[in-house]
Image (cartoon, rainbow, N blue to C red):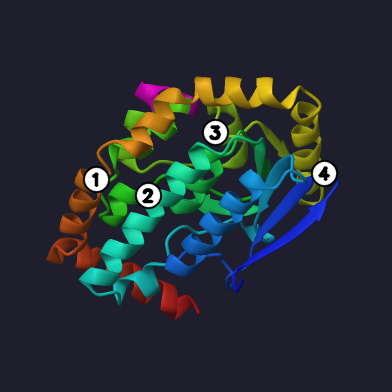
């Protein structure tokens, strides 16, 4: 794989996002994550997964610079596979922990929300869903995922305002379970994972999937409508203008 590094240790699959400085996601990252999760699901030697980023970035979300150049066929393929990734991740039957090693807005936050637990590095980092200010329509399935953790009212306000949280704020509202110094993120994530790996595996798995029933159904239903809404907005001149400004700012910083 080009952008996903994996290591198996003590029945834990460590999955490291490794694409550039900020782990921005394009369709190759999405495909590799799907392949990794599907493989881990059926591998009896893997009992849990820790998903990590790099120091400073868990994932900055979608790679707007790359996606901006996609044509209509490529964008439809990307969003179809991105929604497929959410379906796979939300229905993943084994325990998973996100070791949030830095900034994690938008799509990066969505990946973390698919996990069962989230441990975040303390520091001047942000976490949250800021799609609306960028000009991207938020599918109902992602609202369902967000509200699963912080409640419908808070998720509603947070999404429409594009609110981003500092680590301690994210912990207070339930977006993350624990905030620790960066050098303890991996240790804390492994500890969280092992605390549930000790339980009878089928009972834990079935209960997890039962409790996630609404989430799983939300990911399976209305995908085509959601993709059409996202794509229609993506090609609007107003959205393209916002994206161009963001991209210009990003490339100037580089």
Above or below — where is 117 with respect to 164? above
Examine the image and state in which quarter residue 11 appears: top right
Q: Is residue 100 visible?
A: no
Real-space Cα separation, disc 4 to disc 2, in angstroms: 31 Å
Q: Quadrant of residue 17?
A: bottom right
Looking at the image, is 101 positioned above or below residue 44?
below
The percent coordinates of residue 107 (x first, y second) are: 45, 52
**Could you tell which of marks 2 and 3 lies nearer the N-terminus?**
2
Q: CA distance from mark 1 to mark 3?
A: 24 Å
State the mark number for residue 83.
2
Q: Is residue 193 left or right of residue 30?
A: right
Front of the two marks 1 and 3: 1
Q: Residue at x 48, y 51 (%)?
A: 105
Of circles 3 and 4, the one toward us is 4
Q: Position of residue 109 (x, y in %)?
A: 50, 46
Residue nearest the viewer, comparing 233 with 203:
203
- Residue holding disc 1: 226
Kindly identify which residue carries mark 4: 187
Residue tagged 3? 175
Q: Indicate the position of residue 181 as horizontal and vertical percent values.
A: 77, 45
Q: Count the marks: how many?
A: 4
Mark 3 Cα within 10 Å, few/some/many (few <14, many 20+)? many
Q: Is residue 153 inside the magenta stretch? A: yes
Write down the quadrant of residue 74 in the picture: bottom left
Distance from disc 1 to disc 2, alpha carbons, whole Å, reads 9 Å
Of the two numbered discs 3 and 4 on the same chain, state the one appearing first in sequence: 3
Cβ atoms at labels 2 and 3 below 8 Å apart: no
Residue 252, image x, y percentages: 43, 79
Residue sitting at x 29%, y 44%: 138
CB under 8 Å between callouts 1 and 2? yes
């Amino acid at each position: 794989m080009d952008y996903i590094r994996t290591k198996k240790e003590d029945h834990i699959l460590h999955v490291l996002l490794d694409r550039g400085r900020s782990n921005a996601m394009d369709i190759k990252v999405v495909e590799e994550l799907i392949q990794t999760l599907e493989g881990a699901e059926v591998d009896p030697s893997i009992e849990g997964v820790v998903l990590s980023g790099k120091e400073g970035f868990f994932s900055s979300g979608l790679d707007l610079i790359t996606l901006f150049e996609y044509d209509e066929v490529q964008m439809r393929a990307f969003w179809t596979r991105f929604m497929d990734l959410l379906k796979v991740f939300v229905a993943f039957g084994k325990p998973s922990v996100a070791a949030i090693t830095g900034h994690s807005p938008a799509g990066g936050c969505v990946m973390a929300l698919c996990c069962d637990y989230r441990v975040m590095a303390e520091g001047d980092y942000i976490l949250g869903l800021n799609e609306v200010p960028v000009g991207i329509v938020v599918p109902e399935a992602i609202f369902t995922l967000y509200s699963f953790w912080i409640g419908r009212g808070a998720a509603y306000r947070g999404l429409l305002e594009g609110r981003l949280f500092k680590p301690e704020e994210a912990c207070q509202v339930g977006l993350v379970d624990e905030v620790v110094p960066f050098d303890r993120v991996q240790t804390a994530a492994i500890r969280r994972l092992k605390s549930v790996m000790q339980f009878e595996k089928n009972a834990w798995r079935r209960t997890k999937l039962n409790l996630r029933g609404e989430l799983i159904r939300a990911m399976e239903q209305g995908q085509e409508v959601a993709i059409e809404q996202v794509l229609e907005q993506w090609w609007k001149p107003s959205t393209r203008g916002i994206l161009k400004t963001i991209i210009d700012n990003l490339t100037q910083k580089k």
